Image (cartoon, helix red, strand yellow):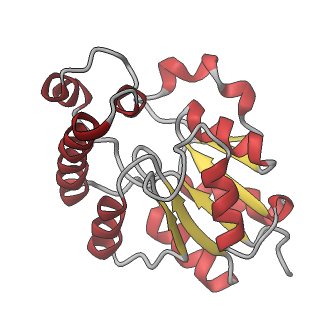
């Protein structure tokens, strides 16, 4: 049976991996008080922005070196490859952190859209770019993430959205569960959604 979905767009931190970025430590190091670090950095100009971006990049690279896979990732990747479904990452992280993650776990993504590529989520642009790079369409793509920015980006780009519910994000879920077309608690469950699509 030919599946309708031919492109799965993954968030990385918190979705493919356990979230291990030390956000409070990053805020202290970058002298940022706001909740969203990347948006705070983008308020700066020139050398100051470059310095803070480089500091953030170092944290992201270290996190990628020690990241642990969420349950079901490798089984899901194998299923997607067997079915000929394209798979990629859309992340607010730097490109190098995704490349490290990809090499460590032997996952060959069909595309990577990092913050160097376009505006970061919640903008729809990275999700749109992922669709284009996969040579797919919004109707044949699906986005998987663990935070509202993933869902907003997907919704604005016109794709179905899947929310991965974890112990870490459970307290925040009421704020954005309405943006999810599907919810899962383990990535293996995505297979069932794809088979029904």
Q: Residue at x 19, y 59 (%)?
A: 65
In this picture, residue 151 sits left or right of residue 41: right
Seen from the viewer's position, the closer of residues 169 and 75 is: 169
Side (left or right) of 94 relative to 9:
left
Looking at the picture, tell me which residue is in the foreground, 169 or 65: 65
The single residue placed furthest to the front in the displayed view is: 46
Q: Residue 24 location in percent, x, y?
A: 22, 23
Q: Quadrant of the C terminus?
A: bottom right
Question: Left of 162 or right of it: where is 148?
Answer: left
Q: What residue lies at 72% left-to-right and 56% top-to-bottom?
A: 142
Image label count: 0
Q: Is residue 70 left or right of residue 48?
A: right
Location of residue 1 in the rendering, given as x and y in whole percent from the top left corner? 86, 81
- Quarter of image, res 28: top left
Is residue 89 shown above or below 147? below
How far across and how far down the image is residue 94, in percent?
Answer: 35, 54
- Residue 137, above or below 172: below
The structure residue drawn at horizontal position 19% and vertical position 41%, both measured from the top left corner, is 51
Q: Choose top left, top right, bottom left or bottom right for residue 14.
A: top left
User: To which quarter of the image does residue 108 belong?
Assistant: bottom left
Q: Residue 60 location, x and y as percent? A: 25, 49
């Amino acid at each position: 049976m030919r599946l309708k979905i031919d492109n799965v767009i993954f968030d990385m931190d918190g979705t493919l991996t356990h979230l291990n970025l030390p956000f409070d430590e990053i805020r202290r190091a970058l002298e940022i008080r706001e909740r969203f670090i990347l948006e705070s950095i983008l308020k700066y100009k020139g050398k100051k922005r470059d310095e803070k971006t480089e500091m953030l990049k170092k944290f992201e690279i270290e996190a990628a070196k020690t990241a642990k896979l969420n349950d079901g990732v490798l089984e899901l990747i194998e299923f997607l490859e067997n079915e000929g479904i394209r798979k990629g990452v859309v992340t607010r992280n730097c490109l190098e952190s995704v490349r490290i993650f990809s090499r460590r776990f032997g996952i060959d993504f069909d595309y990577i859209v990092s913050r160097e590529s376009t505006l970061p989520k919640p903008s729809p642009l990275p999700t749109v770019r992922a669709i284009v790079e996969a040579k797919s369409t919004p109707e044949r793509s699906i986005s998987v993430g663990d935070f509202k920015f993933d869902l907003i980006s997907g919704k604005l780009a016109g794709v179905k959205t899947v929310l991965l519910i974890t112990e870490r994000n459970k307290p925040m879920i009421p704020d954005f569960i309405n943006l999810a077309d599907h919810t899962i608690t383990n990535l293996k469950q995505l297979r069932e959604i794809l088979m029904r699509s």
